[in-house]
Image: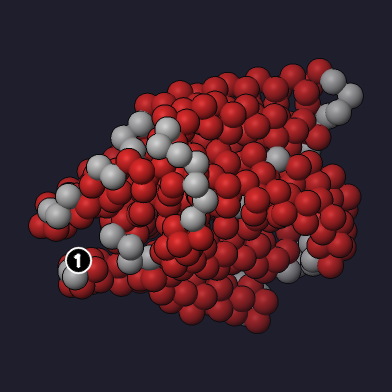
Amino acid sequence: MTLIMFFEFLIGMADIYIAGRVGKEIQATYGFVVQFYFIFIIIANALSIGAVSVVSRLFAAGDKSVLAKTVWSVIVTTAMVGAVLSAAGIFATHWFMEFINIPVELKPYGTQLGKIYACGLVFHYLLVSTNGILRSCKMIRSSLLTMAIVCLMNIGLNFFIVFHTRLGFWGIALSTVISVFAGSIVNLWHCRAFMRKGRVFSFRVVRDVISIGWPAGATQALWQVHSMVMFLILSSLPEKSIEILAALAAGIRIESAIFLPAIAFNMANAVIVGNLIGEGKKKDAYRGGLVTMFMGTGIVLLLTVIVIAGASFIAPLLSNNETVVAETIRYLYISMLSEPFMALWVILGGGLSGAGDTRSFMYNVVVGIWLVRVPLSYICVVLLGLSAASVWWTMNLSQFIMAAFMTRRYLQKKWLV
């Protein structure tokens, strides 16, 4: 899972690097459009989380016929939802860009990138759901192979299309569409092994997956909307708003070197806890979740030190604008202080999700993001006129609060009942 997240990190770094080389406007637009794009990915992630919780326990229990029905039902549902949202994204992007309050010079770029990204939604949905199925059934190396292919295709096509064809910056989005299409086809080939007992669609399976997955979907919706709101708040800065937005986009991509391993351990923890509960080993599930958390947090702590030490060397690689570079470094120096706390609550949340307790994760995000981070950021920037650094410190505070909330929930063991 860590290697898979590393591949996703490389894709993101290549995107932001190329966007920065094209221009600060493209870099700032890319940072916003990606947040918009991942709002559409939310349902896929929710279905995947619900599927992991259900499939991991069925796989451990050894019921192949029910497993086959579940896998087929998840794939069909994911494809249908992805196709609908893909069409909606293509038609709604222009309207959304006209409506949203971002610098006017960024809107044409955002519309073009957004429509291309929307074309690949259905394939991204299939890729996400099939990756979840594979790791639930202990075929994580097949998923790793798929993501290696996606990574190589995405980065290679990115450089080729942007710098060697007339399509230019459109290649940033087009390379994603082509690579996720290829990845979804490879994963569907791997998943055929679980459907040999029949391909029967079950509304009951879909209902069970949704009942577990909807809080996770709501959580990701709240997270992605918050990311867009933070962009809008920073757009209200009286000076250098475009440079700050570009710096945030670059800083988030660098930070993802730390965040993605935490997500990897989150996903691994969901499978570990789900498999052990499926085998009736609740005490082992509890201990396994803690061990995974300590391992993941230790790795994140090490990576945090590396990023802090190398921030002044890494930031100039992603932009040739001095203001963007300086603000990116400032963002990293401040935000890195809370990364181990972020890892703690994210990884423990994965264990709770594997047990089917996705609501605790949702409540945690509501408290930390929407009752702390967003209101305080608005007050600091819009009402008090403070600098972007005040937002970075507010983000740290929210991480500390979420870590405390999630630790308390996990240690109570109510999710094991």
Residue farthest to the left?
283
Q: Nearer the viewer, residue 59 or 238?
A: 59
Q: Is residue 392 above or below residue 125?
A: below
| Place of residue 233 in the rendered image (x, y in percent of width and height, measured from the top left) | 67, 69
Q: Is residue 211 above or below residue 287?
A: below
Q: Name the residue: 70% across, 40% down.
A: 120
Q: Name the residue: 28% across, 45% down.
A: 63
Whether residue 119 appears in this view of the structure is: yes
| Place of residue 94 in the rendered image (x, y in percent of width and height, measured from the top left) | 86, 56
Q: Is residue 174 left or right of residue 331?
A: right
Q: Is residue 331 left or right of residue 108?
A: left
Q: Splitting the image into 4 quarters, where does residue 268 fall?
A: top left
Q: Locate the N terminus by quadrant.
A: top left
Q: Name the residue: 76% across, 42% down.
A: 119
| Place of residue 374 in the rendered image (x, y in percent of width and height, measured from the top left) | 56, 73
Secondary structure beneath label 1: helix
Q: Nearer the viewer, residue 32 or 284?
A: 284
Q: Is residue 367 left or right of residue 386?
A: left
Q: Nearer the viewer, residue 283 or 383?
A: 283
Q: Splitting the image into 4 quarters, where does residue 22 fall?
A: top right
Q: Nearer the viewer, residue 415 or 185?
A: 185
Q: Name the residue: 81% across, 62% down.
A: 96
Which residue position holds label 1? Answer: 416
